[in-house]
Image: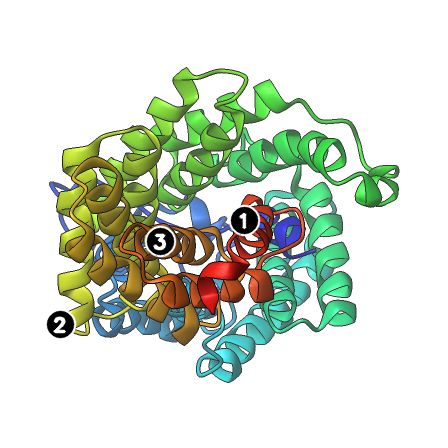
Amino acid sequence: MKNLLYILIPLFSIFFSSSLQQAKAQDLPHPDSVEMLINSMAIQIEATQGLNDMYNFDFRSAESQFQWIKRHYPKHPLGYFLMGLSNFWKMMPNEDDKSYDGVFNNYMDTTITYAEKIYDNAEKKSPKQIEAAFFLSAAYAFKGRLESNRRNWTAATIAGKRALNYLEDARGYGDLSPELLFGDGLYNYYVEWIPENYGELKPIFWFFKDGDKAKGIKQLEEVTAEGFYTKTEAQTFLIRIYDGEAKENPIYREKALNLAGYLHQSYPKNAFFHRQYLKLLYMTGDGNKTIEESKNALELIEQKAFGYEGTIGRYAAFFLGSHNFRALKNYEEAKKYLEQAVQFGESSDAQDSGYYLYSLSYLGQIAHIEKDYKAAQGYYEKIKDHADRKHPTKKEAKEYLRENRKLFK
């Protein structure tokens, strides 16, 4: 359910030329205008710096811009949604952080309230109603994602179904706005991908129109070229999609890496983008760049930069430990980083993650090489306690403990 809700979230972002001058107040749509606010060039210009600040994790500056939109358009969902989005991104580096739940839910509930009023009062299938359906789909999807993170499965399911219903309402109107084309692209790709990968969820999709994965990818790529509010989010989803399709088409892995590198370069303070980039560097075998970015990530953790915590720390420490162990045979350095990876895993309650388990495996192998058999036993016992029965390290741990029992005495 968590994966399902994640991919249904029509997020907002913006990427607009810095050469544009700030719009004058008289250029802005009137608060009671029938114009689609997400198509307003003046609003896009006003929001540019705020969205760029948000993605670069400068939330104070971002929210001052969003509050201006909220005050200027108090009965439109856009400003409230952007404030909710900002609080959601505060949770992205660590989805278990509950400190933003209350304010996030308040903003998304207000988004829904105002979007429902527009949706109910607008002419059927008019641009205004389609825009409202877009906001409703987005707000419910975000709320569902949070509920799934909190393991409130009933609430998550209800929110997810509502998001799907409104997404279906807004589907097919990409000619009205690139932002709506984003929803089309997500729908076309994931309405096919989910049943292929989660057989138990097939019944949910019996009542929805067929999609087209290839068309969905092309639509998302079009949004990255033409979208304003959804450009960066389309890129974020494409990284995930490209990475997932890389087994069938290896060129997608390179595309994923390029997009991740672009986002990290554009928003260097965003720990989530940094983590995506770091992971793809490792997976594509760029050893030197992986080492460089891993060290940068650990330094930012030391500096207590926002969002730099256990998850990216686990990645970075594992990559450095693995390199020192496997490539350099520098066991002391390897142990230092692998122990760090284990500590990061335990501090963020991620003992079932691959990086945590493989860190223990490598530590066990090093301990065996150094004839510290009791230490090796301890590492493999931890693997046995935490690894899923199908995880490769589980079999390795069982075999090691069985075959070396005499060494532990």
Instruction: Give, as a three-letter code, the residue at label 2.
Output: Gln
The image shows residue 397 at horizontal and vertical percentages of: 54, 53
User: Splitting the image into 4 quarters, where does residue 216 fall?
Assistant: top right
Total numbered labels placed on residues in the image: 3
Instruction: Give the residue type at disc 1.
Output: Pro
Few, some or many residues within 10 Å of mark 2 (<14, 14–19, 20+): few
Residue drawn where x is 35% and y is 33% of the image:
283
- Residue 303 numbered mark, or none: 2
Q: Are marks 3 and 2 in contact (CB under 8 Å)?
A: no
Q: Position of residue 36 (x, y in %)?
A: 50, 48
| Residue 275 pos. (x, y %) | 31, 51
- Front one among 182 and 205: 205
User: Which residue corresponds to mark 1?
Assistant: 10
Mark 3 = which residue? 368
Residue 287 tag number = none
User: In whole angstroms, how far apart are the C-alphas of marks 3 and 2?
Assistant: 35 Å
Q: Which of these two is toward me, 158 or 120?
A: 158
Q: Residue at x 55, y 57 (%)?
A: 401
Image vertical order of residue 394 relative to residue 205, above or below: below
Q: Looking at the rendering, which quadrant does residue 272 occupy?
A: bottom left
Q: What amino acid does circle 3 point to?
A: His
* Horizontal relation, residue 255 to residue 153: left or right: left
Mark 1 to mark 3 CA distance (whole Å):
50 Å
Helix, strand or loop for disc 1: loop
Kind of element beneath mark 2: loop
